[in-house]
Amino acid sequence: MPASKAKQAITAERRTKLFQLRLQGVKYDDPRILNLGYSTPGAASKDVIRGLQARRDAEAAEVSVYRQQENERLDSLLEAVWNKATTPSPVFDREGIEVAREIDLKAVDTVLKLMDRRAKLNGLDMPVKAELSGPNGGAMQVGPVGIAELRNLIRTAGDPDDEDDEPGSADEEDNTDDGDDTA
């Protein structure tokens, strides 16, 4: 059975004070925290975890409501443009004679944008997987590197701005004189 509203209010007030003390860097075994009514430092720690979980649950519920509202708005917009995007309309010449039937490509573009927005909102798209390839297409280890290592990687991979350059060519040197003396 859930706690009474009075007990919930007392718990919320105590938890708020606990969070304020923790934000100041006060440790769980400090008397200021234990004097809030916690029997042990572990009990205070557990209450912080419960408070954070309650906040995450509340945020998740708010996000769910927002997502539902946005989906309903997208439904309305999609319904408004769907027929134009899927049903061919007559095309008339200058004399008013029907010469063709075409779908509205602008409406098709709008439908696709709405569908893309819905996919992003609901997390329907697969994540994009990117891989950095090394020489001969093999996997490349990436981590903190120095400037010399970065230059070596650029030489190995080639300059993406100039695919005609050969590794080690004069164009890659930082201090080459290109004959242009203008500043």
Image (cartoon, rainbow, N blue to C red):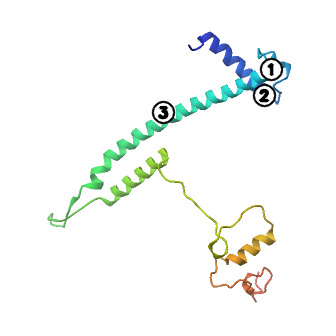
Q: Are marks 1 and 2 in contact (CB under 8 Å)?
A: yes
**Which disc, if any, is residue 33?**
1
Determine the CA span between mark 1 and mark 2: 9 Å
Whole-percent x, y for residue 46 in the image? 71, 25
Classify the position of the C terminus by image quarter.
bottom right
Q: Which residue is mark 2?
A: 22
**Which disc, if any, is residue 122?**
none
Relative side of 93 to 134, left or right: left
Of pointers 2 and 3, the one earlier in the residue sequence = 2
Q: Is residue 117 above or below residue 159?
A: above
Whole-percent x, y for residue 111 in the image? 36, 53
Whole-percent x, y for residue 90 in the image? 20, 60
Amino acid type at image mark 3: Val
* Residue nearest the observer in this picture, 174 or 182: 174
Whole-percent x, y for residue 170 in the image? 75, 86
Q: Which residue is mark 3?
A: 65
Label 1 neighbourhood size at 10 Å, few (<14), some (14-19), many (20+)? many
Secondary structure of the residue carrying tag 1 is helix
Determine the CA span between mark 2 and mark 3: 31 Å
Question: What residue is at 44 percent from the left and 36 percent from the top?
Answer: 69
